Image: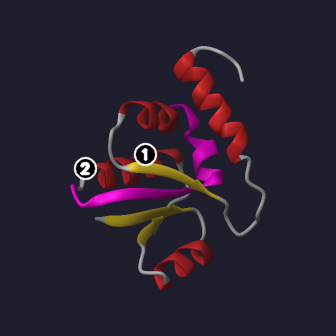
Amino acid sequence: MKCFLISDNADTRMGMRLAGVDGVIVHKPDEVMSALNGAVAKGDIAVIFITRQLIEMCSDEIAELKLTLRRPLIVEIPDRHGDSHISETLSRYVSDAVGIKI
């Protein structure tokens, strides 16, 4: 099984490429969803890494995929600008899935 990166900057792609993870650079919501759907359609990708800025750009669509897909695992990663609010994102997903606020 492989990992795949969807990033909004070349620095993150270069770092992940050095670790053996292939990926693409996108900047628009339609490009994000096209890259994500293409990666999901491949049978050999187990984990898709997406930078935080792109997750925010298509948050509703990505949240729906995370809740409905069994595979691949979609993981938010911080970009070169740092700051990540993963705990807030997880709380929101749990709240949406279960219907209670944590």
Residue at 49 percent across and 59 percent down: it is 49
| Residue 41 numbered mark, or none | 2
Q: Nearer the viewer, residue 8 or 99?
A: 99
Q: Does residue 41 appear left or right of residue 60 in this picture?
A: left
Does the magenta segment cover residue 42? Answer: no
The x, y position of residue 65, in whole percent, is 42, 36
Of mark 1 and mark 2, the one earlier in the sequence is: 1
Residue extent of the magenta highlight? 43-60
SS type, badge 2: helix
Q: Does residue 11 appear left or right of residue 25 in this picture?
A: right
Classify the position of the N terminus by image quarter. Answer: bottom left
- Residue 47, compared with residue 10, is above or below; it is above
- Residue 16, compared with residue 98, is above or below; it is below
| Residue 65 numbered mark, or none | none
Q: Which residue is mark 1?
A: 33
Q: CA distance from mark 1 to mark 2?
A: 12 Å
Residue at 35 percent across and 37 percent down: it is 69
SS type, badge 1: helix
Residue 68, quarter of picture: top left
Disc 2 crowd, CA 10 A, few/some/many (<14, 14-19, 20+): few
Residue 90, quarter of picture: top right
Residue type marked 1: Met
Classify the position of the C terminus by image quarter. Answer: top right
Q: Does residue 95 appear left or right of residue 29 in this picture?
A: right
Q: Nearer the viewer, residue 30 or 49?
A: 49
The x, y position of residue 12, in whole percent, is 59, 73
The x, y position of residue 56, in whole percent, is 64, 43
Disc 1 crowd, CA 10 A, few/some/many (<14, 14-19, 20+): some
Q: Nearer the viewer, residue 90 or 6?
A: 90
